[in-house]
Image: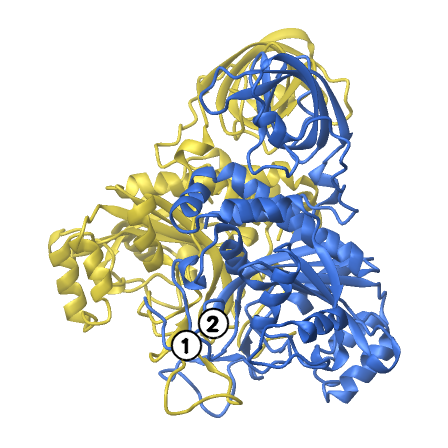
Chain colours: A yellow, B blue
Amino acid sequence: MFGARCLLRALRSCTSAPCPRHKPSARLSVRDALGARSTNGERVKVQGWIRSVRSQKEVLFLHINDGSSLESLQVVADSSFDSRELAFGSSVEVQGQLVKSPSKKQNVELKAEKIEIVGNCDAKDSGFVHIHTPIITSNDCEGAGELFQVEPSSKIKVPEENFFNVPAFLTVSGQLHLEVMSGAFTQVFTFGPTFRAENSQSRRHLAEFYMVEAEISFVESLQDLMQVMEGLFKTATMMVLSNCTEDVELCHKFIAPGQKDRLEHMLKNNFLIISYTEAVEILKKASQNFTFTPEWGVDLHTEHEKYLVKHCGNIPVFVINYPLALKPFYMRDNEDGPQHTVAAVDLLVPGVGELFGGSLREERYHFLEQRLARSGLTEAYQWYLDLRRFGSVPHGGFGMGFERYLQCILGIDNIKDVIPFPRFTHSCVL
Amino acid sequence: MFGARCLLRALRSCTSAPCPRHKPSARLSVRDALGARSTNGERVKVQGWIRSVRSQKEVLFLHINDGSSLESLQVVADSSFDSRELAFGSSVEVQGQLVKSPSKKQNVELKAEKIEIVGNCDAKDSGFVHIHTPIITSNDCEGAGELFQVEPSSKIKVPEENFFNVPAFLTVSGQLHLEVMSGAFTQVFTFGPTFRAENSQSRRHLAEFYMVEAEISFVESLQDLMQVMEGLFKTATMMVLSNCTEDVELCHKFIAPGQKDRLEHMLKNNFLIISYTEAVEILKKASQNFTFTPEWGVDLHTEHEKYLVKHCGNIPVFVINYPLALKPFYMRDNEDGPQHTVAAVDLLVPGVGELFGGSLREERYHFLEQRLARSGLTEAYQWYLDLRRFGSVPHGGFGMGFERYLQCILGIDNIKDVIPFPRFTHSCVL
């Protein structure tokens, strides 16, 4: 539905190279430029990213955004500027005159005299390859046990054997299959339905939901992963805002007043990073009474996630380095002594809580072998272990719940309202 | 995977308006232009569709294809031409000089002196809306019974009740859900996994496969539907050929020699149309001995489909108007007397057989009510009947098997070779 295309374009054009961070050296922010009262030709400089390019015969229209405002600044340039270099996603510094716009869509526009490319954005060279990971699988990626099993319907079932010879389930994540493919394509992603047989009626769970999942070879730190995650969130959101303006405004106006400001706040700030250990300390010091007492070694609950985001000033926050005992076998051992954590990362966002989950993967054969043996999974995951036997590389990846993402940017309270045919316990309508 | 993006772009930019047919008025076909021996500046005229646009500061490169060749002709224009109008998919007439190309990629190129837009291609105004139709459903769209049933795995199963309160299955088609959405968005499509619990080891069946499905409101004839189907096949193929040239060439060179010519043959000819009744007559007259004797009222088998395509000179052929008794309840009654057919259409293609299936849908309340009653489905499909009670419109749609499409254009014999993780009876590896 709406948003999905933008999200995929954002991921395809995402690079795993460090995203440029905002620097406060811009003479005028986009917000200030848009709010300028005197527009009698004063010379200004604006820095930001190109959000759209429209090329006409003698004139080029760019929309520039720097995160200071949801609205972009229109830049008007003559055809002498090279429209090939001025591509979506490139960062630029524009100098020119701030003038009254002849269009009713905006009050002011920037008449460009000089446009400098700060960072090129060539989506072709650094894109992710889209993989169709299977829906039916004989794996249980999360080890969580909340699986749907698949068998031919009773009408045609041959009871004494499985259709696939082995028990088959609906996928809970495409990660393991992506790991296979990242060994050939380096950077891969999938976007498709995933399933959990959770007996939940909460406003953020579905039995069938969409995930964007990415897997990146040659990634050696959570920092690199987090940059891709933050980049994906921000770029996708910018694209949704510029391509689906009316739909977003409808939600922000009638469903979630104040959401526009909350979203601007998320976009213009760098996401925060705290460790799981720090998170537990923050929760322990909280004046709030929790239903579940926060304790090191126990998973965070929704109430904890919400408190942490609020504590962080309603800026999205990465929580990293969780206890090994809480996480699946494939997450990379931090070898950090008695606490024993893994290089896992969750991104918590206002209103929703956990939006992304990711980790570095255990790429070291002997570490993985021992973890599998301890879980009694060695035989089932021999093929996965083999990926570490032949040409293993440090790698990592993440998944983002697509419906929760829509909840987060649109301010929709119940997840069942962002998908046309929601499936949850006791309900499979149509 | 590769191809999917092109296919989706093709569908998004597809219009349900009649596609322009090739007219033999071009002075020089692309094939002839590419094969020209003397390139000493002779003036020529080429007509075709724009397959790519690359805009540089002082020069504009277009690739023009008219279906006479898999390769496109490079047109070089100076920057005085309006690159905004020269968009992907627009039909153009280019006049200019055929000259030797300085690039090694082609021998000749056309130096444009005049470019006339024959038909604009504005993808934004006429696109299809992408809908995520659900995977888990309580419907059986095809009524075929070859369904996978879904239940929480035995570990957590509560045996006395269904997780969703009703029996739930893996979707065999998103059609019925698309019909709901086409009542709001007019033109919609879905692209996702579908499932059949068929006990088949054939080289063209999978238990999990991808389908592109489209549904179009206000369509009143199979002709209109077939134009969209043919347009989708040809446009998507052109896009795959121009965007994934190396991958396609690899297949054509090492796996399916001769496939390039076969594909050119499909692209440059208008697809044929025969009725089911004509098809049965052709099969009855055939000198070939079939395992299944062709007979009116009986479904076509693979061997029949193959014969028909061969009989039609290896040009894709639409077979229309099938017996009502062979088809599901939602297909539109042709009211054609004792034979009693429905407005169904299958597209048969060389090497694969059935690639598309579609139909006009029964939009008349009383006709549909009777069909449902006769099948004992009235209660289960009350919601579907309601779509005809409130604001019903003539509409129709189709589905295309994505893996079979790849088989068809790449010349891959076994469907299991065009998907990374194939699922079929007795096999669910990884």
Q: Nearer the viewer, residue B108 or A388?
A: B108
Image coordinates for residue A267, horizontal then vertical, percent: 50, 37
B125 relative to A122, above or below:
below
Image coordinates for residue A217, horizontal then vertical, percent: 28, 44
Task: Find disc 2 in the rendering and name its residue.
Answer: B207
Image coordinates for residue B155, horizontal then vertical, percent: 35, 83
Image coordinates for residue B168, horizontal then vertical, percent: 55, 79
- The residue drawn where x is 64% and y is 65% is B308
Label 1 chain ID: B
Label 2 chain ID: B
Residue B185 sits in which quadrant? bottom right
**Do marks 1 and 2 share a subunit?**
yes
Q: Secondary structure at mark 1?
A: loop
Task: Find disc 1 in the rendering and name its residue.
Answer: B425
B354 relative to A156, above or below:
above
Instruction: Name the quadrant of the C terminus of chain B.
Output: bottom left
Residue B23 sits in which quadrant? top right
- The residue drawn where x is 82% and y is 60% is B221
